[in-house]
Image: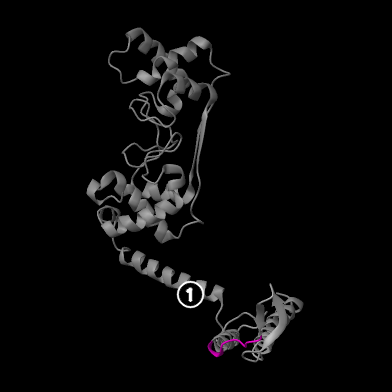
Amino acid sequence: MSTFWSIWIIVITAGMMVGCLWLLFANARGVPGEVKDHTWDDDLHEYNNPLPRWWLNLFILTIIFAAGYLAFYPGLGNLGGRLGWTQSGELANKLDALTAKRRAAFAALADKDFPALAKDPSAQSLGHAVFLGNCAGCHGADAHGAIGFPNLTDKDWLYGGDPETLVKTIVEGRHGQMPAFGAVLQPDALQALVEFVPFWSDATLDAGRRERGMKQFAITCAACHGADGKGNPLLGAPNLTDNTWLYGGTSKKVRETIVNGRGGQMPAHATLLTPEEIRIVAAYVYGLSNAPASLVTP
């Protein structure tokens, strides 16, 4: 705050307090029983009675309290008060206390490995809190994901679900890209894939459709998803032989994916989370698909 505005606030505040005192004492000079020269409706008179003493004293006490408050706490422009208290300082103290408490909680779990953390209710609770603040916006509060955002509670992983890979994913982020083939595939080639890929594990799929689909798959898709369609964690290419689909596994959705491609972005959290937070939230995610259900924070 500039010096001008600080002085302006001091003058107004002090002036208001002095004005209130003047008003109080000015109204305390009445004479009990004295009738003023005001009459309404022939018989209604105004008396000049002073304020009751207890009421006057109460007002005076409030002004004294205000003066004392302003002497010890900030309120007069840039004057900080004799106690040196500030809102920002109070907030900083509370934040420091909370940080110290969190560090102590993390320190108590520092010597435990991921399997142990996955079975520790306190570690899972702490990891759940970090998850809600940083991951739930995409993966959901229950970590079941949504269209385009993976479910973290099963054992189906694009890049791997081991502890080291989870930490790497959180720290560095991921960028998945499925190229668009709409401009390069002939209609019959596209149709062969659409009729086959969503039904890969369907034992009743017509042999002719399977043969045509496998032939086209080997040409168009096997480089990323593998000849067996089970994906490639190094590329983040999903397994196409199960019933887990990131963008939907219907024929319509598979066609959209092949024609238009897909792009997914997992942001890096190296600068957003501390190493302790990264480790504990990675352990929480690991525990979602590895710990007993009774120990997973809902």
Q: Is residue 35 above or below residue 189?
A: below
Q: Is residue 292 above or below residue 101?
A: above
Query: Between residues 46 and 80, which one lies in front from this camera angle?
Result: 46
Q: Which residues are magenta?
A: 48-54
Residue that sits furthest to the front in the current view? 42
> Which residue was labeled with disc 1?
93
**Residue shown at the point (34%, 43%) measured from the top left:** 161
The three-letter amino acid code for the residue at tag 1 is Asn
Task: Using residue 222 as the reference point, say whether residue 271 is left or right of it.
Answer: right
Horizontal and vertical percent position of residue 70: 60, 84
Q: Quadrant of residue 72?
A: bottom right
**Residue shown at the point (50%, 49%) measured from the top left:** 268
Query: Between residues 187 and 92, which one lies in front from this camera angle?
Result: 92
Q: Secondary structure at mark 1?
A: helix
Q: Is residue 216 above or below residue 63?
A: above
Task: Using residue 190 as the reference point, say whether residue 296 is left or right of it.
Answer: left
State yes or no: residue 164 in magenta.
no
Main secondary structure found in the magenta portion = loop
Q: Quadrant of residue 12?
A: bottom right
Q: Is residue 247 above or below residue 17?
A: above
Task: Using residue 175 as the reference point, say whether residue 127 is left or right of it.
Answer: left
Residue 161 in sight here = yes
